[in-house]
Image (spheres, rainbow, N blue to C red):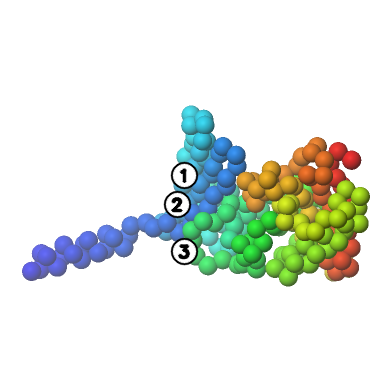
Amino acid sequence: MIRIFSFFLILFLFSCKQKTELVQAEIKSFNMKIDLRLYSDSTYVFKRIYEFDSIKNETLKGTFKLINDSLFCSGDFNFNGLIINNFIESIEEYEKYEIINSKINSNSKIDFKKFPTYTTFTFDKSKNYNHFEETAIPYDLTENDLLKIDSTLLKCLNETKYFEGMEHTNNYSKQCIATLNKKGEVQVWVNCACSGIAKDFFKYYITNTKDGGHCYFKLKINLSTNNCYDISVNGY
């Protein structure tokens, strides 16, 4: 009886020590997928998988620290990021991993299932696409802000000759970077692309296309004054 009890005790203790998956996140882009998984023993596995060129596939491993919503990975994959709005966002560049499964709580102001044509990135002066004045500081957009962006964007586009008569913006994927200026006004840089072209990757990183006509355009919106400015349509 004692032996049976000891066996089950050892089995229980062993099962308690087995690592479990805490987070699964991914990037999907054309013929390539990145899969990042964080485990309860503070290890991670990062896989880059190519659909049509498997010889380029790679697996990276290492350890991570999670402090509040900040993620620090070391080892084969060095990465510093922030968990926000169901994404793991790099603090070094405009790149995000979408969280597919998670057993941890994270800061979330936006449910992007309600806004499938929008994504947001956190402003940082050290990153590319710094379209704001020197005194600008980051601002976290909310769902109400996205609603205001959508209505203001439609109004502004109808005031230009390229988009006159547009009834909604659902045909465009919108990437947003928001700041506060020295007056305390919310300014948003909005990068737009036809959804059929951009739907597979617009959530994950900022795109920059030099041509494509009205399928690609960008502008700024001041949410405090509901004004648009710096409208730029590719090829015009």
Q: For the C terminus, which image quadrant?
A: top right
Kindly tell me whether residue 230 is visible in this rendering.
Answer: no
Locate residue 56, reporting x and y percent.
Answer: 51, 31
Distance from the alpha carbon under mark 3 to that under mark 1: 20 Å
Numbered disc 2: secondary structure: strand
Contact check, label 1 and label 2, Cβ < 8 Å? yes
Q: Nearer the viewer, residue 80 or 228?
A: 228
Numbered disc 1: secondary structure: strand
Mark 1 or 2 closer to N-term?
Answer: 2
Locate residue 171, reporting x and y percent.
Answer: 73, 52
Q: Which residue is mark 2?
A: 43
In the figure, residue 42 lies in which quadrant? bottom left
Distance from the alpha carbon under mark 3 to that under mark 2: 15 Å
Residue lying at 67% horizontally and 61% vertically, measured from the top left: 115
Locate residue 123, reporting x and y percent.
Answer: 74, 56
Residue lying at 91% horizontally and 50% vertically, measured from the top left: 161
Q: Nearer the viewer, residue 202 or 97?
A: 202
Q: Which residue is mark 1?
A: 61
Q: Which residue is mark 3?
A: 103
- Dot 1 alpha-carbon crowd within 10 angstroms: few under 14, some 14 to 19, many 20 or more: some
Mark 3 or 1 closer to N-term?
Answer: 1
Kindly tell me whether residue 196 is visible in this rendering.
Answer: yes
Between disc 3 and disc 2, the foreground one is: 3
Residue lying at 52% horizontally and 36% vertically, measured from the top left: 50
Identify which amino acid the numbered label 1 is placed on.
Lys
- Dot 3 alpha-carbon crowd within 10 angstroms: few under 14, some 14 to 19, many 20 or more: few
Q: Is residue 7 left or right of residue 225?
A: left
